[in-house]
Amino acid sequence: FAGLAALACLVLGACARPEPLPILGQVPDFQLTSQTGRPFDSRSLEGHAWVADFIYTNCPGPCPMMSSQMSRVQSGTAGFGGAAGGVEMVSFTVDPARDTPEVLAAYARHFRAQEARWHFLTGPQASLNTLGLNVFHLNGVDGSLEHSTRFALVDGRRRIRGTYLTSEDGFLGRLLGDIRRLEREKT
């Protein structure tokens, strides 16, 4: 009977491992400032899968919805990663002139961000612009406050492995499923 099950796996491909997620880019080292006011070094994310987005705190449009969705990612990944420390979230501001660490901290509290896992980052406009435009290919940080409503999934080696349009039905399930796939790639 075990032989039939093995044959079925081979014929149907049901036991095959899914294809690995594509590698869409590499996130270089960066240093910004977190909502705590302390320097944030991207090397602290090594070994962790993380989800990134670009928001600003006084956004009248999609940012509150995106931050609510990121909060769901935070709670939906609470047990991921085991001893490795789990999944982290990074929200980059597109309004560094107004989004000071203090403003970001208040915004983070509103969305019940776990400080150890969800980082709200600000810094020089040029650095944020490079990340948004040239690294994530989502948006510039140029003073216009226009930004993408996509989340980006980054693996523990800081490789971009997927982007997810937050307005698409089922995006959150796909994102959480892909995070699980990254967790399985580690083993």
Image (spheres, rainbow, N blue to C red):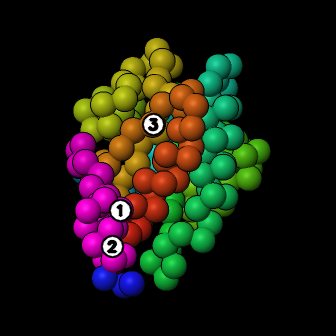
Disc 3 crowd rating (10 Å Cα; few below 14, some 14-19, many 20+) is: some
Q: Where are the magenta residues, as a range?
A: 4-26
Q: Foreground residue, 39 or 162?
A: 162
- Tell me the distance, in whole angstroms, between the alpha carbons under discs 3 and 2: 22 Å
As drawn, 83 above or below 52 = below
Tell me the residue at 32%/68% (across/down). Answer: 8
The amino acid type, in three-letter code, at marker 1 is: Ala
Q: Foreground residue, 62 or 109?
A: 62
Q: Quadrant of residue 62?
A: top right
Disc 2 target residue? 186
- Tell me the distance, in whole angstroms, between the alpha carbons under discs 3 and 1: 26 Å
Element class at badge 1:
loop
* First-in-chain label (3 vs 1): 1
Q: Foreground residue, 26 or 107?
A: 26
Which of discs 3 and 1 lies nearer the camera? The answer is 1
The amino acid type, in three-letter code, at marker 2 is: Lys
- Tell me the distance, in whole angstroms, between the alpha carbons under discs 2 and 1: 21 Å
Whether label 2 touches label 1, CB < 8 Å: no
- The numbered dot on residue 111 is none
Q: Is residue 76 visible?
A: yes
